[in-house]
Image (cartoon, helix red, strand yellow):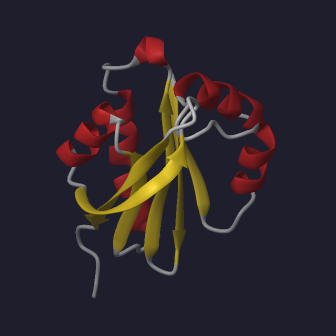
Amino acid sequence: MTPAALAQLHAVCFTTPRPWSQAEFDTLLHARGVFLLTEPGGFLLGRVIAGEAELLTLAVDPNQRRAGIARALVAAFHEEVKTHEAQTAFLEVADDNIAARALYLATGWIESGRRKAYYNSSDGTRRDAIIMVLPIDGAEG
């Protein structure tokens, strides 16, 4: 997927946090440790640096949700970060994104913290970010 296609899908999927621009995707795709995973109808952007992985964003076309695309992308993320020898992974998710939080919990992620009023919502309110961690199976240390 091109940065333009990533930005277009991201814009359809997110208002909180705000969608990322084509330029932001282009910059990220050229950054050290960043990788892109795709499935028809969705993508996941991740990063591994110094043994720590981050799930940066996950987007699935709203018309294709509940078909296992996000679950497949999260599973692929888990396998990808193992190949980069990550020992742990983390992500942030808006506290009101119930579907994403349920997916992450169902795939082994654990809620570990909260960043109060972290995201600006499109309606002007602020949303907390839930921090989640995932121990990587087979990681040394």
Give coordinates of residue 96: x percent, y percent.
35, 37
Res. 40 in view: no
Q: Nearer the viewer, residue 64 or 99?
A: 99
Looking at this view, is 59 or 141 the one in front? Answer: 59
Q: Is residue 94 above or below residue 59?
A: below
Residue lying farthest to the right in this orientation: 23
Q: Residue at x 70, y 55 (%)?
A: 28
Residue 21 appears anywhere in the view:
yes
Q: If the image is split into quadrants, where does the C terminus sit? A: bottom left
- Residue 63 position, x and y percent, is 45, 11
Which residue is the extreme one toward the top? 63
- Give the quarter of the image for residue 94: top left
50 sits to left or right of 91? right
Left-right relation of 129 to 6: left
Q: Is residue 102 above or below residue 51?
A: above
Above or below, 141 against 25 in this view is: below
Determine the residue positioned at 46% across, 17% down.
Answer: 62
Side of 47 relative to 71 (left or right): right
Q: Residue at x 41, y 74 (%)?
A: 85
Asked where in the image residue 27 lies, by quadrant, the reply is bottom right
Picture coordinates of residue 133 (x, y %)? 30, 63
Q: Tell me the quarter of the picture where residue 68 sits.
A: top left
Q: Tell me the quadrant of the picture where the N terminus can be found.
A: top right
Where residue 104 appears, as percent x and y from the top left, is: 28, 46
Residue, x 35% and y 55% (percent of image)?
78
